[in-house]
Amino acid sequence: MSRNFPTLQEKVGNASSRSVQDRVSSVSQREAQNVLRLRVNRVCLVQQLNVDPVVDYLRREGILSDTDVRFVSRGANRSEKTRMLLDMLPSKDPSTQWYNKFRTSLSATSTVDATTARNHQILVDFLDSTNLANLKSSSTDSVQHSEQQQQPPLPPIQPQEDDPTSAEHRQRWKALRSAAKSR
């Protein structure tokens, strides 16, 4: 049920004029931030999103096609449908403002029931409060930091000769090994 979606680079192609490149750079940075917001909050979105009214809203807004809606509806359960939707959204044309409409859909569909209203408001708050600046710097800092400071391996644990349980333990292991070899 896997479906490949084009990357932003594939959608934009090679821009030759400077103004197009500037516009692409601006769009691609905002697009990257929106994709990052979905990735950071993915677990919460999968757990809390009432996906069917969101899909209906995005279809009415022209973000999702009938084919997209059928693809998402093939999910076995709500979580799988949500994952499929979250994987699909970043493949949409940036000019459609898919992220803004997705975010708006969370508020617009909160009239379904009280639980959906509460959960979708929490999701909007999570999406809005995602601090992308710290994520970008902390992820690159942690990679650089881990490369620079790798911990030396711990020394092996030496059994205590005067510990009666360790001698007993070694005997049991020897018996188990010899039983396994004889099979």
Image (tube, helix red, strand yellow):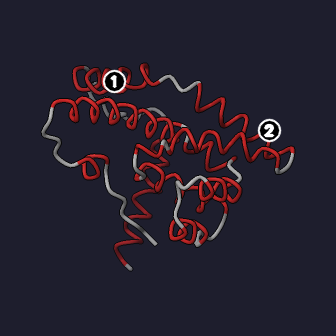
Amino acid tagged 1 = Ser
Residue behind mark 2: 118
Q: Disc 2 or disc 1, which is closer to the eye? A: 2
Residues 51 and 138: in front is 51
Using residue 105 as the reference point, say whether residue 119 is left or right of it.
Answer: right
Q: Is residue 183 left or right of residue 65?
A: left
Describe the element under mark 1 as helix, strand or loop.
helix
Q: Residue at x 40, y 49 (%)?
A: 93
Disc sitting over residue 61 in the figure:
none
Q: Residue 19 in the image: state x and y as whole percent.
A: 21, 30
* Quarter placement of the C terminus: bottom left
* Disc 2 element: helix
Q: Which residue lies at the image location 55% right of the left edge and 38% below the top edge?
A: 100
Q: Earlier in the sequence, mark 2 or mark 1?
A: 2
User: In the rendered view, does 121 fall on the left or right side of 13?
Assistant: right
Q: Position of residue 109 (x, y in %)?
A: 74, 47
Residue 167: % across, % down: 45, 44
Q: Amino acid at mark 2?
A: Arg
Q: Is residue 41 above or below residue 56?
A: above
What is the spatial separation of the Cα atoms under label 2 and label 1, in whole angstroms? Answer: 35 Å
